[in-house]
């Protein structure tokens, strides 16, 4: 009989401990029939709290929580939201956890107010390895790759926190200033490539990798105004080929609507109306500009478009992705266009879908063809409608952690022992979220023999 040794830090070495999360670990684990799957869950769900958070307090007494990604000592807006998202259901019963999450919101707001075009930040006004990038770098900014989904992540966390706790205290003057700045930024990035003044954003980096820099003097690929908002970089931190990233715009629709409700709840009707109007504008543009007719799969969502009629048909493992559209709340799992899109992205018609001796799944150009991202396998399970598909995903996740007890960034499709990033908290916590979701919605799957 296999013995699975706890891979978590000692209690005294954990960055933060939540009694509510610890209770869930014990309670849910007891309902998982497969001991290895239960072990993975116990290691992965608390990984963000165990290892990546630094709780603190601002000068004016507000909670302030810095969240690193894991093996990169900086805070990404997108990653930090995804890392703490599965803890929201526990916040109402755990006041210390609620304070920690409120601190993440305050920290994200401070980051946006520092620079809405930056994707990753330091805890203080320091500079780092990307200081030589040709862009408007500021102290406190780790990297300045503008990714639309980063700003959406800030809106998502604040709205999700409010829905989970009923607490409106984070919606202060700074938060409203940040939302107004986000709306201003999204509108600026709707501009035509040749408009004046157009987008103020420029980015170039000296790198042998073309995905690390932007063409046209740092402006990125040309785009025509169509109602979508530009995202020069993907959630993988790779440059887009066409400027309008469809999954990020879909995420913008959802999060703008959610934050509109949040703002209405505190009586800020003008800003609520502005966010709602922008959401409708982007949604209309998606229906008009972002759909493609595939010869094998029918009407599907494109991954990127340029407003000139050109479309890129692929999907990337990083969220937001086309695969993740129902998870993000943009559509239902059984939506016909999504189902057509899902069939495409989970087939070899998607250039970044791989099959090998170790498994199958979606990757992306960030690491390269042939490398499968567990994150995409987790998302496949979260968006599946059939038990059999979910079980297949769980089996693959169980078989590809290479004995470490954690999820990785990627593994080689023929050999799971070849993997990248042994400490990647987003993937770990997302796996925990999958198990919590299954426990709530499909407990019989966890009680079956894998």
Image (cartoon, rainbow, N blue to C red):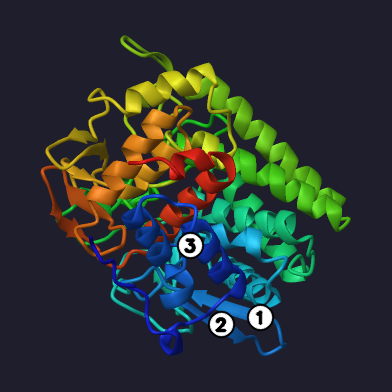
Q: What element carries label 2?
A: strand
Residue 212: x %, y % from top left: 26, 54
Label 2 or label 3, whichever comes before in sequence order: 2
- Label 1 crowd (10 A; few <14 / some 14-19 / many >=20): many
Q: Which residue is drawn at 62% across and 26% down?
A: 284
Label 2 or label 1, whichever comes before in sequence order: 2
In terms of depth relative to the viewer, which is nearer, 193 or 354?
354
Is the Cβ of the residue at disc 1 closer than 8 Å to that at disc 3?
A: no
Judge from the rendering whether residue 331 lies leftward or rightward of residue 77; answer left or right.
Answer: right
Label 1 or label 3, whichever comes before in sequence order: 1
**Placement of 192 over or under 256, stated as above or below:** above
Q: Which residue is drawn at 36% across and 51% down?
A: 34
In terms of depth relative to the viewer, which is nearer, 172 or 277?
172
Q: What element carries label 1?
A: strand
Residue 417: x %, y % from top left: 13, 56
How many numbered circles are shown? 3
State the CA–CA distance, disc 2 to disc 3: 15 Å
State the CA–CA distance, disc 2 to disc 1: 7 Å
Residue 123: x %, y % from top left: 48, 81
Is the Cβ of the residue at disc 2 closer than 8 Å to that at disc 1?
A: yes
Q: What element carries label 3?
A: helix
Judge from the rendering whether residue 438 lies leftward or rightward of residue 296; answer left or right.
Answer: right
Residue 188: x %, y % from top left: 57, 47
In terms of depth relative to the viewer, which is nearer, 6 or 372?
6
Residue carrying label 2: 55
Residue carrying label 3: 83
Residue carrying label 1: 63
Residue 402's quadrant in the figure?
Answer: bottom left
- Label 2 crowd (10 A; few <14 / some 14-19 / many >=20): some
Kindly tell me whether residue 99 is visible in this rendering.
yes
Judge from the rendering whether residue 266 lies leftward or rightward of residue 151; answer left or right.
Answer: right
């Amino acid at each position: 009989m296999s013995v699975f040794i706890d891979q978590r830090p000692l209690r005294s070495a954990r960055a933060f401990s939540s009694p509510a999360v610890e209770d869930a670990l014990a309670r849910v684990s007891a309902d998982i029939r497969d001991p290895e799957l239960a072990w993975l869950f116990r290691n992965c769900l608390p990984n963000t709290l165990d290892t990546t958070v630094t709780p603190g307090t601002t000068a004016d007494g507000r909670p302030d929580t810095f969240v690193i990604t894991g093996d990169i000592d900086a805070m990404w807006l997108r990653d930090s939201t995804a890392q703490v998202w599965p803890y929201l259901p526990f916040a109402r019963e755990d006041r210390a956890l609620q304070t920690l999450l409120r601190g993440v919101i305050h920290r994200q707001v401070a980051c946006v107010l520092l620079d809405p075009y930056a994707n990753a930040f330091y805890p203080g006004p320091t500079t780092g390895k990307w200081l030589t990038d040709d862009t408007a770098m500021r102290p406190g900014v780790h990297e300045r790759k503008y990714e639309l989904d980063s700003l959406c992540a800030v809106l998502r966390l604040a709205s999700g926190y409010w829905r989970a706790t009923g607490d409106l205290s984070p919606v202060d003057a700074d938060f409203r200033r940040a939302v107004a700045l986000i709306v201003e930024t999204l509108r600026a990035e709707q501009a035509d490539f040749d408009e004046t003044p157009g987008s103020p954003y420029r980015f170039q980096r000296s790198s042998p990798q073309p995905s690390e820099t932007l063409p046209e003097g740092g402006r990125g690929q040309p785009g025509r105004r169509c109602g979508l908002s530009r995202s020069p970089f993907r959630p993988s931190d790779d440059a887009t080929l066409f400027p309008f990233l469809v999954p990020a715009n879909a995420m913008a629709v959802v999060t703008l609507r959610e934050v509109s409700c949040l703002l209405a709840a505190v009586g800020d009707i003008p800003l609520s109306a502005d966010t709602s109007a922008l959401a409708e504008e982007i949604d209309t543009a998606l229906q008009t500009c972002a759909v493609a007719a595939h010869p094998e799969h029918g009407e599907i969502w494109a991954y990127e478009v340029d407003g000139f009629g050109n479309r890129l048909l692929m999907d990337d493992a990083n969220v937001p992705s086309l695969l993740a559209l129902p998870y993000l709340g943009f559509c239902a799992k059984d939506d016909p266009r999504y189902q057509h899109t899902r069939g495409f992205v989970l087939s070899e018609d998607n250039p970044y879908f791989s099959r090998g001796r170790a498994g199958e799944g979606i990757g992306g150009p960030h690491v390269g063809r042939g490398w499968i991202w567990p994150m995409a396998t987790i998302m496949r399970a979260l968006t599946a409608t059939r038990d059999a598909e979910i079980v297949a995903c769980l089996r693959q996740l169980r078989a590809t952690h290479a004995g470490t007890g954690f999820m990785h960034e990627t593994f080689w499709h023929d050999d799971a022992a070849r993997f990248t990033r042994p400490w990647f908290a987003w993937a770990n916590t997302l796996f925990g979220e999958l198990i919590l979701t299954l426990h709530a919605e499909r407990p019989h799957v966890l009680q079956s023999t894998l």
